Amino acid sequence: MHAPIVHTAPDPDALAVRAAARVTALVRAALDRRHACDLALAGGSTPARLYARLASHHAADTEWSRVRFWFGDERLVPPDHPNRNERAARAALLTPLRVPEHHVLSVRDDLPPDLAAREYEQRMTNLGLRARGFDLVLLGMGADGHTLSLFPGSPALGEAARLVAHAVAPPSSPVKDRVTLTLPAVADAHAAVFLVTGSDKSDTFRRVLNEARRDPPPADSLPASRVRARTPVEWFIDEAAAGSPPVG
């Protein structure tokens, strides 16, 4: 097991600067290893600053046209729906970078949830991801400790073989049906990077970090605690999320 690595920044803007530099370095390293890079994007609001920073300050120093962009999880709503993760990623990152359309791997919204998950997994298999894994998976964490669309108590947490699964969000979520990467899919990735901001997540983060440092994590551990990758999982957090005294 690799112990997690924590990077702490004073605020969300400074965090985006540090995280963008690290993400760019990981993408460039992947492109040095082979002809393409497979990157899974995180959803939610936290990555917005990171995506804007990548598009504004790192557009010219990386061959983004060689990167295939996947979605770590997706809400099964139409492409133009405000709750669609792809919609936000296109606006902040993919369109400004002029990513070729065939390098944006969208989750289909016109299939039943389980079929949408299986179809997405089949495309990953066809492009070799079952054999080699993602180069990089970006992740967020909710105040309840969920990551991707893997919520506490979700049956998808127990998936041991599939790369992609149908997941159901809690009733408080605006969109119930999701397609999500599974823990095995992330475990096969070369690198996994979390981005976490906000004081409402500080208690959860400390619990997750404690659980993640145990191998195996406790049976009742939160979903984010269970994330592993081939290299140490990296956490980029602001001081509000790190709590007092700051972690990292």
Image (cartoon, rainbow, N blue to C red):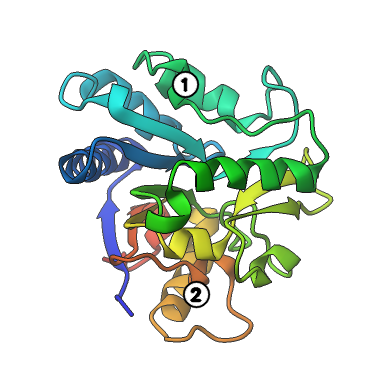
Q: Regarding mark 2 in the picture, which secondary structure is present there?
A: helix
Residue name at image x 52 percent, y 48 percent: 125
Which quarter of the figure has residue 232?
bottom left
**In-image side of 191 versus 185 (left or right):** left
- In the picture of the structure, the residue carrying the numbered disc 1 is 102
Residue name at image x 50 percent, y 71 percent: 225
Which quarter of the figure has residue 48?
top left
Is label 1 or label 2 in front? 1
Which quarter of the figure has residue 14?
top left
User: Residue 149: x percent and y percent?
Assistant: 64, 52
User: Residue 204: x percent and y percent?
Assistant: 53, 67
Q: CA distance from mark 1 to mark 2?
A: 40 Å
The amino acid at mark 1 is His
User: Residue 148: x percent and y percent?
Assistant: 57, 52
User: Residue 18: x percent and y percent?
Assistant: 23, 43
- In the picture of the structure, the residue carrying the numbered disc 2 is 207
Q: Regarding mark 1 in the picture, which secondary structure is present there?
A: helix
Q: Please tell me how crowded label 2 is: few (under 14), some (14-19), or many (20+) other residues with Cα within 10 Å.
A: some
Q: Please tell me how crowded label 1 is: few (under 14), some (14-19), or many (20+) other residues with Cα within 10 Å.
A: few
Image quadrant in which the C terminus is located: bottom left
Q: Which mark is residue 8?
A: none
Q: Is residue 189 visible?
A: yes
**In-image side of 109 versus 50 (left or right):** right
Residue name at image x 23 percent, y 44 percent: 30
User: Disc count in the image?
Assistant: 2
Earlier residue among tags 1 and 2? 1
Residue name at image x 37 percent, y 13 percent: 98
Q: Indicate whether 176 appears above or below 133.
A: above
